[in-house]
Image (cartoon, rainbow, N blue to C red):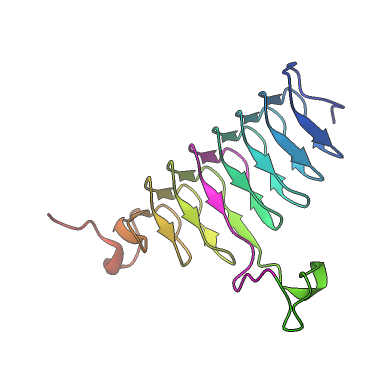
């Protein structure tokens, strides 16, 4: 493990991060309490929260948000301004009107499998799995699991195409 990214950039918050070798982190990124795998690139204005895991050789484009509970396996692509969520029922306060704390909500984990790609502006709701080599189209809102090799787009995201061997329901849509 490396102590720091291989590049120098101004105005970064890097606190309690486990870095693999040859990681690049651009300016204005906030990374804290997370793990970044070898050879990954983190764009400007990216936030990766405590407990998030980024695999090796991943690319996270600018303005993306990877929250606690998200795991990106190796070779995942995250486009610009992608947002992950980790709370199915977010609230600012408890029923007693006190600000919520860690114990007041349930963290929902999300896993993005190896070599998946997520297009710019996509929103990934929590508690999901995006399958190996799947593609999520730009601007999609993913509300349920995405099968291995599928291509999904829209709001809510729907299958446009599936890899060979996938169920007929995921075959290409004719337009």
Give the residue drawn at x 75%, y 28%: 12
Q: Is residue 23 above or below residue 31?
A: above
Q: Quadrant of the C terminus?
A: bottom left
The residue range painted magenta reads 73-92
Q: At 65% from the left edge and 71% from the top edge, which residue is drawn?
A: 91
- Please identify the residue farthest to the left as the structure is shown: 175
In this rendering, the answer to whether 19 lies above or below 52 is: above
Q: Residue furthest bottom?
A: 95
Location of residue 169 by image quarter: bottom left
Find residue 14 and report its horizontal and vertical position in percent: 80, 33
Drawn side of residue 11 relative to residue 59, left or right: right
Q: Position of residue 106 (x, y in %)?
A: 71, 73
In this view, the residue farthest toward the top is: 8
Residue occupying image coordinates x 36% and y 64%: 156
- The x, y position of residue 52, in whole percent, is 72, 50
State the image quarter where residue 36 is shown.
top right
Residue 83 forms part of the magenta stretch: yes
> Could you say which is closer to the camera, residue 50 or residue 159?
50
Tell me where residue 145 appears, x and y as whole percent.
Answer: 48, 65
């Amino acid at each position: 493990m490396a102590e720091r990214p291989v590049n120098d950039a101004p105005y970064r918050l890097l606190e309690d991060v486990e870095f693999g070798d040859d990681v690049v982190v651009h300016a204005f990124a906030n990374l804290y309490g997370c793990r970044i795998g070898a050879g990954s690139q983190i764009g400007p204005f990216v936030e990766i929260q405590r407990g998030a895991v980024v695999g090796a050789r991943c690319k996270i484009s600018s303005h993306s948000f990877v929250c606690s509970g998200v795991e990106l396996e190796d070779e995942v692509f995250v486009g610009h301004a992608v947002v992950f969520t980790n709370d199915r029922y977010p609230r600012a306060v408890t029923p007693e009107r006190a600000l919520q704390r860690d114990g007041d909500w349930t963290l929902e984990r999300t896993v993005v499998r190896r070599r998946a790609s997520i297009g710019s502006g996509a929103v990934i709701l929590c508690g999901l799995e995006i399958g190996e080599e799947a593609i999520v189209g730009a601007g999609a809102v993913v509300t349920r699991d995405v099968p291995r090799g599928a291509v999904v787009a829209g709001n809510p995201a729907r299958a446009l195409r599936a890899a060979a061997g996938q169920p007929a329901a995921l075959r290409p849509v004719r337009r």
